[in-house]
Image: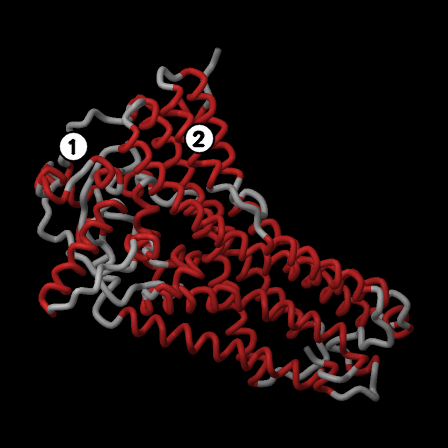
Amino acid sequence: MESSPLLRCHASIQSPTHRNLLEVPGTHERRRWPHIFWFILKFLNLYYHDRVVMTRKCHICRVKDYLERKRRIAMTWGTTRSPPSTRTMDYLILAYEEDDKATDHITSYNTISEQERCDVCAFLWWNSEGVPEVYNEKDIGVARWNHRGSGVLSVLLLILAASVLCYSGMVPLIRYWAKPYQTLHLMLKSTLIIFISTFPLLSLCSKIRSFSRSGHASKYSWATVLNVRYLIVRGQFLNLPQKGLPGTWLLVLCVGYALIIQGYQVAIFLYVSECDITPYTIASTITGMIFFEMWGLFTYLDFFIRTSFQSQLDLVLAYLKENEGEERKCRGVLFATTADLLCFEQFCDLLSAIFFPCLVLAVVTNATRDYLISGVDCVIKDPRIRDAQRNISWLGWTETASTAVIYFLALGGFQANYMRDQFLINLIHLKTEGKFPRFWRRLTKDMKHLESGSGIIFASFVFSVIGIYGGFEFHDQILVYLSKSCSPNISTSDMCI
């Protein structure tokens, strides 16, 4: 019987003698990651306030080091207070937020001292073939992009982006608030602002988590996904130097769709609109294009992370199969993998909780407007006005449909927990063929303990139902945009989008 696709990769896992790729002549250039990857991180303002490639240790080793440091500090200051309990230690903070030594002095995995190396720590340096391959910032090409001051600059730019979005949201709120005939327009604008605000706000949360590193930061562990150290670890499993970025077709689609939508909007203003082009419309068009591009690249990063996990989970299954019975090693590797995966799942749940209601509201408001506008007299009688409203409708549906398709393609659905479910199925399959039932029973038990539903998705569903109900309550709305002649008694600010 043919084995599962996830189990076919076990032959790629190397023997315990690790390859020293850094010692091979000419390897330095071959290991350089694509410049486009670093440009994407730069454009999204994701760079860090510190070095991004540091020494890596498993959770057990980090906890030992942490407690040892606390013990030395206590002895130095003469206090009898005991070190903090390991129960309060966040794995993601210790793994991705702690200051540690850079890897510039390391020339290969074998040059790491015996005291700093263990089998689980070696797993944290795996490449796409399951071989520990130590690198530094210069090797992969990030050194020239993550320069001194990058962290501060990225925070300032994200605050600027949030301020622009706040202003863009306040303008329609002030203009259309308490105007029953503008409810539909306000919902359309609000949906768009919430949608494009997602990335800058989540990224700011990630920066706050990186700077705080306190126990309270554990409450939003999902923000680690936007930590550049986390993204670099994800890139290890994709063989970027040889194969380049995965899914270049999706990257082109994410970048191209924003340009097409904004170009279509400009064409409507220039050729079918009766409204004047003002500095505000020009600025809003430019900023809209930038934020749409940011959202597109942000969505591509979700695909990048998902593809990395698919590769990593294949390697982990092969590792568990080859090291059957070695419980400490295998449970350590499984813990490190699932901790990162659960972080990504929580992040995707939050995204879906924001995206799904916006999608439902966009569909409801666009469909409601299309039904109501079909009975407006001036639209029926005037071909020019009818053409303008038809193009506005097409623009709204193009934005909604293309955004939904790209989001679905990036995540492979509206949630990412299917990867963990598939991994567990393969783990149970290995259990039935294994020689140590107790060993596999403990691993599957560990995985099942990590299963948890998301109340966020339920809340998303509730708000979506409210939005659908609201769609049936619209009446006496301004439905004709960009056409002054159709509604001469309506002010220009209410008529022009």
Q: Which of 17 and 160 is in front in this view?
A: 17
> For mark 1, does the 10 Å Cα neighbourhood hold few (<14), some (14 to 19), or many (20 or more) residues?
some
As drawn, the label of residue 444 is 2
Q: Position of residue 265 (x, y in %)?
A: 62, 68
Q: Which residue is drawn at 9% across and 40% down?
A: 114
Of tags 1 and 2, the one toward the viewer is 2
Would you place residue 391 above or below residue 236 in this image?
Answer: below
Three-letter residue code for mark 2: Thr
Q: Residue at x 57, y 83 (%)?
A: 280
Q: Is residue 426 left or right of residue 191?
A: left
Residue contact between numbered discs 1 and 2, judged by CB atoms under 8 Å: no
Q: Which residue of the protein is positioned furthest toward the top in this rendering?
A: 1
Residue at disc 1, secondary structure:
loop
Would you place residue 219 above or below residue 304 in this image?
Answer: below
Q: Can you identify the residue that label 1 sits on?
A: 19
Alpha carbon of mark 1 to alpha carbon of mark 2: how far? 31 Å
Residue 373 seen in render: no
Q: Nearer the viewer, residue 181 or 486?
A: 181
> For mark 2, does the 10 Å Cα neighbourhood hold few (<14), some (14 to 19), or many (20 or more) residues?
some
Q: Which image quadrant for residue 395?
A: bottom right
Would you place residue 22 above or below residue 80 in this image?
Answer: above
Q: Where is residue 405 in the image (x, y as percent from the top left)?
A: 60, 49
Q: Position of residue 344 (x, y in %)?
A: 45, 50
Q: Quadrant of the C terminus?
A: bottom right
Residue at disc 2, secondary structure:
helix
Residue 425 seen in render: yes
Q: Residue at x 42, y 65 (%)?
A: 203
